[in-house]
Amino acid sequence: MYQRKVQKTGGSTYFVTLPKEWAESVGIGPGTVVTLMPNDSGALLLVPEALSERNECVVELGNWDADRVFREIYSRYIVGFDIIEVRGERIGSDQRRMIREVAQALVGLEIFDESQSRVVLHALVNVRDFPAEKTLRRVFDITRAMVFDAVSAFSHRDQELARDVIERDSDVDRLSLLIARQFSLLLRDLMLEEDFGLSRLQFFHYNDVAHQLERVADHAGKISEATIALEAPIVAAVGHEIEARAKTSMAILERAVAAFSGQDIELANQVLGERANEERLFSITRRTASDKQPDAAAAISIVMDSLVRIREYGFNIAENALDAPASTHSRTGRR
């Protein structure tokens, strides 16, 4: 931490000096242009022009399996690096293929250059092309369709549809990771608030809602996996009961997302008011469905547990719907 006394010159201008060691380390010298950005907290952020040019990193490739390669590149992408250079003494064909698969799994990540000893990835995502509101809506639309298709596949033992649901989970992951990356970028660079049209505190809620929806999509995948494992069709009466509980859970989720998107505090409170309702009904459905078809009791239990969890994620989103407007009011109130 550096401390400086504010000085006055010319009768009307205040100025402070910059620490020389810090200034030189970030490329500031005589004549350098810097940006001064007021923060909602009352602080003033000083941003050197050269700072954005240093947004790159190097990954020293080891003798890693696919999961390790994925994690190493994923983490750099989410943190917000624009250039990720992967280096190794000699990158083999298997690891090169892994790197390509990672690039394909992340929005806007492209291979820009490669040789025997390195692969350079560039994140070409323009934040203005992916506004958080539209990205979150797309995540919800995909997730909603996944849940209903997963439940339908289970009720009718449609294993082909179940496999399709599992494949769609990657689409939710890609968009959720994009929102996580944008949030990290915003934490690192307050100047992006203007591009995003959201403060860091507001974007925190978008990131959290995207994470909740990603978990819902994961449960759609679990239901689909239970479908693939079924050895016999589900009894019609059991299927109807499960579909009814699915509609109840999804109604909670849909209303919670609507409350968040519309900053509707009243609707959010209505959703949260239903938290204590129907818990017993879900328990009864699980027990009676298992009694009607004991050979599928384990699969039915997995599905019912996932539907209960989906309700809980809906309630979490409703809580975000309460907090997000408060963040907006706090932000505007300080201006």
Image (tube, helix red, strand yellow):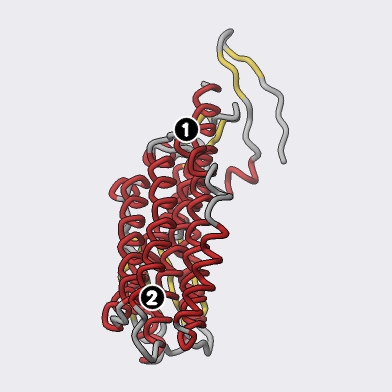
The one nearer the camera, 29 or 267, is 267
| Image quadrant containing the N terminus | top right
Provide the secondary structure element on which disc 1 rests. helix
Distance between the alpha carbons at the discs numbered 2 and 1: 42 Å
Residue at position x 30%, y 63% in the image:
145
**Residue 56 versus residue 182 in the image, above or below:** below
From the image, tell me which residue sits under label 1: 266
Question: Which residue reaches farthest top?
Answer: 11
Label 2: how many Cα within 10 Å (few below 14, some 14–19, many 20+) = some
Residue 217: mark in rendering: none
Residue at position x 48%, y 52% in the image:
314
Residue 231, quarter of the rendered image: bottom left
The one nearer the camera, 140 or 76, is 140
Find residue 30 and report its horizontal and vertical position in percent: 51, 36
The one nearer the camera, 219 or 97, is 219
Find residue 310 and report its horizontal and vertical position in percent: 48, 60
**Residue 332 versus residue 223 in the image, above or below:** above
Provide the secondary structure element on which disc 2 rests. helix
Q: Amino acid at mark 1?
A: Glu
Q: Amino acid at mark 2?
A: Val
Q: Is residue 47 visible?
A: no
From the image, tell me which residue sits under label 2: 102
Find residue 295 and report its horizontal and vertical position in percent: 47, 88
Label 1: how many Cα within 10 Å (few below 14, some 14–19, many 20+) = few
Residue at position x 71%, y 38% in the image:
2
Residue at position x 33%, y 50% in the image:
137
Find residue 42 and report its horizontal and vertical position in percent: 59, 26
Disc 2 versus disc 1: nearer the observer:
1
